[in-house]
Amino acid sequence: MNIVCAESVFKGKEIFDEFGDCTVIPDKKIKNDDLKGTDALIIRSGTIVNQQLLDKTPVKFVGTATSGIDHIDLKWIKQNNVYFQDAKGSNAESVADYVITAILKIMSKDKVDFKGKKIAIVGYGAVGTILAKKAKSIGLKILLNDPPLLESKRLNKINKSTSDNNREIRNKLKKLDEILPQADIVSIHTPLTTIGKWPTKNLVNKDFLDLIKKGAIFINTSRGGVCDESALLNAKKNGAIRYIVTDVWKDEPNYNIELCNQSIIATPHIAGHSYHAKFLGSYWIALSLSKLFKINFNQKSHSENINLINKTIHINIKTFISEERAFINIIDQAYDIIEDSNLMKETNKKTDIERLEAFKHMRLNYPIRREFRDIIIKSTFATKEFKKKLASLGFNVLD
């Protein structure tokens, strides 16, 4: 079997060499000619997959190790009987951890008690579901919006396989004009779509932003095209939004410098780039490829790598003035989001070409970041309530 794998696919060569001859090519340099003798194409969001790329090639399988699929021409692929697999949900924990970290960092900076504050989660898919659970566990009140799901609720088509807790949360689904005026935090988790009943391109526009509670925190970790960046900047300038957290950009890697400067936290599309998430994305695609072509794949070996826990945080509560300060310290040790932001903002001083290359380099060479669920917490003098809150975020808390 011949496979072409985009350079950004995590451990692509290591995993997909098990299936045959795997050739690695930089994401944006994969061309039609490269696929003339190829059975399977494995990519991430940096490769546009359409007729121009695949026409008159023998490619039978396309797998994207990402949750988003806006870089895939699904209609053409289906019409030409090419099997397609995404990795939807593989980065959900990673993105939710990123959002929680950003919220806690901002609120601790302003010495704001986050308990009782309201978060509007726009998009209640894999990420939104996990984020809602984590946000609730730290005392935030949950507001939800997801029009397709809201309609299915009205039609009594809620997925009955979900947990009781999820069904309870889904009953809270409301329209944007009902939740945005109440929200202290607005976090976007929709796919980028341009067709259908609920297109999300430029969903966050002037009308959307005019609804937001004055002084709110706005977070976008979905897709850059979901947000009208000019409207967002105007909302920041006129004080409608106090803080912006931006991980995704409309014209990546040619990101908006002004939006970067105006964001309290700005990162190069790495919210979902934890070790676990990247490995899981590649692993799920490999499983699908194995099943389709009936090729043996060493699942046990790779699954052990995914679940590897190799980070431990030790903390003595008595060394802090309060449990809240100890809690924030643990979050800081788990993920230094400000370091990522500072690295991104440093690139603003470079030339345009250097900035584009720096953006791509930061994503491609992103250092290992562990999700909360891959970290052990060993605490001294911690209360049961403190340990419970950490565990509810996903940490492995030892007695």
Image (cartoon, rainbow, N blue to C red):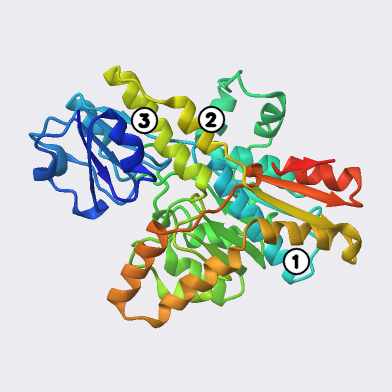
Quadrant hosting residue 331: bottom right
Q: Are marks 1 and 3 in contact (CB under 8 Å)?
A: no
Which disc number belongs to residue 36?
A: none
Residue 112: x percent and y percent? 79, 66
Measured Cα–Cα span from mark 1 to mark 2: 37 Å
Residue 124, percent from left and from top: 57, 39
Q: Is residue 259 left or right of residue 369?
A: left
Label 3 belongs to which residue?
Answer: 286
Whether residue 195 is visible: no
Q: Nearer the viewer, mark 3 or mark 2?
A: 3
- Mark 1 belongs to which amino acid? Ser
* Residue at image mark 1: 108
Q: Earlier in the sequence, mark 3 or mark 2?
A: 2
| Residue 347 visible, this angle | yes
Pointer 2 residue? 151
Residue type pointed to by label 2: Glu
Query: Mark 3, residues whose alpha carbon is within 10 Å: few (<14), some, or many (≥20)?
Result: many
Question: Which callout, 1 or 3, points at the residue further toward the start of the chain?
Answer: 1
Along the viewing direction, whichever of 104 and 290 lies nearer the viewer = 290
Earlier-in-chain disc, 1 versus 2: 1
Q: Quadrant of residue 229?
A: bottom left
